[in-house]
Image (cartoon, grey):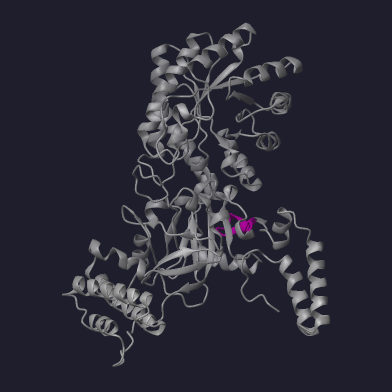
Amino acid sequence: MSEWTAKQSSDLYQVADWGDNFFSVSPEGNLLVRPRQDDGPTIELPRLVAELANRGLRQPMLIRFSDILAKRIESLAGCFSEAIAENDYSGRWRGVYPIKVNQQAHVVDEIVQSGAAYGVGLEAGSKPELLIALALLDTQDALMICNGYKDRAYVEIALLAQRLGRNPIIVVDRFEELDLILAAAQDLGIRPHIGLRARLSTVGAGRWVESSGQRSKFGLGPDELVRALARLGDEDMLDCVELLHFHIGSQITAIRAHKDALREAMRVYVGLHEMGATSLHLLDVGGGLGVDYVGTGTDDPSSKNYSEQEYANDVICAAEQASSEAGIPAPDIITESGRAMVAHHSILVFDVIGVNRDPSLHKPPACDEDDHPVLHGLHDAVEGISPENLSESYHDLVDGRDEADSLFALGYLDLIGRAKSERLFRAGCQTIGEILATLGEAPEEFEDLRGLLTDTYFGNFSVFPSSPDAWAVKQVFPIMPIHRLDEQPNRRGVIVDLTCDSDGRIDRFIGPGEELPTLPLHPWKASPYFLGLFLVGAYQEILGDLHNLFGDTDAVHVRLSEDGGYEVQHFVEGDNINEVLSYVQYDLRSLSERVRKTIETALRAGRISLQDSALLRRRYDQGLADYTYLLHGKSD
């Protein structure tokens, strides 16, 4: 049998399928990051992690690659540029980034800077996001799309932004907002740029399909759209309508949903023009452009069955055909494809801190003469396993285990005997599993063996703040070792985090055409073993919580330098314990004082020595300033 190669690891973890040419595996078995895809140098991820640790970053760490952000924006702009040229389209692409997808300050600022060459704007779905957009978006002619539930202050800020040279479009998400916008505009003496959000009957495709169509949270139905134009006409403000917006959900998995929505939206667009809204010149197709997290190219909820170029072609074709047939100018196209812009640029790297594995699996215990017959039967079943009788042997093991369980419950088998039955059963399963591994794909009847022989790898991270979609909506993210990839990963494992919650685990992984409940991993040797969780740049940082008071991780922004190396641009320190305690309204001085008083009481009662009391005080005060995650080798 030939030695394991890094190429085999790359194929095993399907790096080429989900990596979009940003990631690869070196012959030495290290994961490589190519932030500019084929146009630039590579960064050896394990080496980067080591160098960042020497700079003071702690595990887990979130690494953001600024060049990947820029490349994703460039790619999206390129797809629409090609579609526009191919269709001789007279409108242009005017992308905006929805701040809600990742609101981190450095991320939004980098998007504004990288997107300036393409006129990329920002979309705000709340008042706080509007304040961000107002401050950061200084790109000439870039759009500031104002969505979400609005109050008077929100509308006034958006209107007054015009006087700063900004280009805000206030989208009417609910019919009642129209009066609010008109009243504020009249009081300020500003003619607003108005958008209308249509509630389409077309539904999306994927995990969020139930929030689209007639169940949409926002949007105006046909009757409300007609009444809105009539209301604006009465106020002599019909020319203020500049944009039609729709949104059919996030992570749309099937191109058919996009096509159907575009067809319906353009019918609405043409209808509004025919009713006198001739200033209408912007079509905002919303978000929904999916990311292929698993690389299958299907309508699986974690994938998509279309390319970005196909998406751009369909958007431009639908707009061109409908506007041409109606004899009206083709609209400029706005996309809010935030997930596609930022998902790839962030990687969470964490270390494995322990593995649960039964040490007794490989060698079955011997049976004494006075052991219960059920134990002798299990021992004989284990000794008799061969490639020719795997099914029969497995059935004998299961029957013996179940009988031992019943005997123990009825008092006919003691705890030592029950433990021996378990060791025999697991040893037999291990032997069967090793034989099956040499035969290729295991028959369905041995499916339960997979769970019995799975190791549990404890990761120094929390699922809840770092990848909330993994547990909330069962999103599958690429996860794999970032080194030792020239070694065969001969263990199967699931990943669990530091929390005490049973949901703090990842047990859905990328497989060849299907999701797998276990991940191939290397034996843990107690030395650093690093895993990477990929494509976490969209939504994951901002949707998380403080479960078990594990906070934000250390984060760093890395950019390629002119000399072919890289430079660390921003270091964002993660939460320490004192910070997360303050988030949940604990007074740190009060906590420390209460511990001091308790120690003094214990000292007087003789329950603790002076030396131990000093150690406890020191550890307590140090603990308040520590990272919320585990720090190895940091005691003193």
Q: Residue at x 37, y 35 (%)?
A: 255
The residue that appears at 48% across and 53% down in the rendered structure is 471
Q: Quadrant of the C terminus?
A: bottom right
Residue 589 as seen in the image, left or right of residue 628: right
Give yes or no for residue 617 being in the magenta stretch.
Answer: no
Q: Position of residue 600 (x, y in %)?
A: 83, 76
Classify 142 as above or below 504.
above
- Residue positioned 45% across, 32% down in the render: 80
Who's the residue at 60% across and 10% down the image?
231
In the displayed structure image, the side of residue 411 where residue 199 appears, left or right? right
In the foreground, 172 or 10 = 172
- Magenta highlight range: 551-569
Image quadrant assignment for residue 492? bottom left
Q: Residue furthest bottom?
A: 369
Task: Tell me the quarter of the image containing the N terminus.
Answer: bottom left
Q: Residue 291, percent across and down?
A: 44, 44
For the view shown, which residue lies furthest in the left direction? 388
Question: Which one is in front, 12 or 501?
Answer: 501
Q: Position of residue 199 (x, y in %)?
A: 49, 24
Residue 87 visible (yes or no): no
Residue 368, image quadrant: bottom left
Residue 280 image point, x, y percent: 54, 16
